[in-house]
Amino acid sequence: MPCEVWRGKLEAYVDGELPLPEANALRDHMRGCAACAAAALERVQMKRSVAMAGKCYEPSAGFRAKIATTFCAKAEPRTGWLRKIIIVPALLTLVFALGLTFYVSRARAERQQVFSELADLHVATLASATPVDVISTDRHTVKPWFEGKIPFTFNLPELQGTEFSLVGGRVTYLSQAPGAHLLYRLRKHELSVFIFPDSSAAGTTASGAFQMRSFNFEEWTQNGLRYFVVGDVGTNDLAALTKLLRDAR
């Protein structure tokens, strides 16, 4: 298929909306076509820039506190004590409910934002001509490479006897915090494993499976680190790699 046809599919690819067979075919094409790979990477970087710019318009903590104070203010200076007893608890209940709803919505939005950024990093890596900075299938080569480059250490699993193979790794960033990005291969699929300090993962606290666009995710916290696994494979395959990482010593 000529490059002109593939270029028309790049927007759907970076958004995870391209059917899996076409996504795999486009990924294979980009490995041999630097122009298409660069075009895909440019689109991913543009998405991330727009997402970061949007954060400039989030309400500040001070503004939210001011709104909450306004809700809690006395309704009327001359209101009788009986009316105050009825109204104030009702207002407090309303404020609590609104605050809880806002907190849950914000937490959900932040979690989705984290997964969106990780999906973009995964796509950008697959589209890059140099997806990893340290190329090795040996965990004893890849793990030491990160020493001095990120402020933590981690364990990698032994893959002998499994269908997974280690491709390599690179340093990456999430919410300006440095972390490790490891690339694994399963049959014809690549899976990304991201590791960050737990406190840096954009406030994300939930664990478990998640699906966004055409990717499946697994996340968990272990030994003060937050792990994310992302790939276009089935949940069983993702769970198998997750178990290997959890049990790594």
Image (cartoon, rainbow, N blue to C red):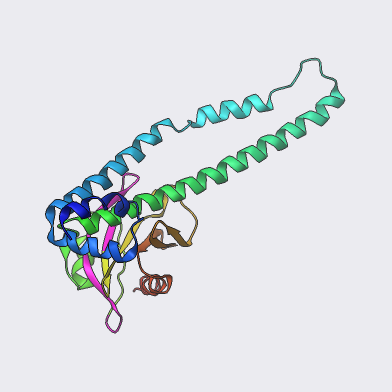
The N terminus: image quadrant: bottom left
Q: From the viewer's perspective, is 55 left or right of 134?
A: right
- Determine the image quadrant of residue 72: top right
Q: How many marks?
A: 0
**Which residue is drawn at the image coordinates 21% and 72% (left, top)?**
140
**Which residue is drawn at the image coordinates 23% and 56% (left, top)?**
125
Image coordinates for residue 116, horizontal then vertical, percent: 38, 50
Q: From the viewer's perspective, is 135 left or right of 81?
A: left
Image coordinates for residue 117, horizontal then vertical, percent: 35, 49
**Which residue is drawn at the image coordinates 12% and 54% (left, top)?**
34
Q: Judge by depth and name the residue closer to the eye, 189 or 10.
A: 10
Image coordinates for residue 149, horizontal then vertical, percent: 22, 54
Q: Which residues are magenta?
A: 160-182
Image coordinates for residue 147, horizontal then vertical, percent: 22, 59
Q: From the viewer's perspective, is 232 left or right of 93?
A: left
Q: Main secondary structure of the magenta part?
A: strand
**Which residue is drawn at the image coordinates 16% and 54% (left, top)?**
3
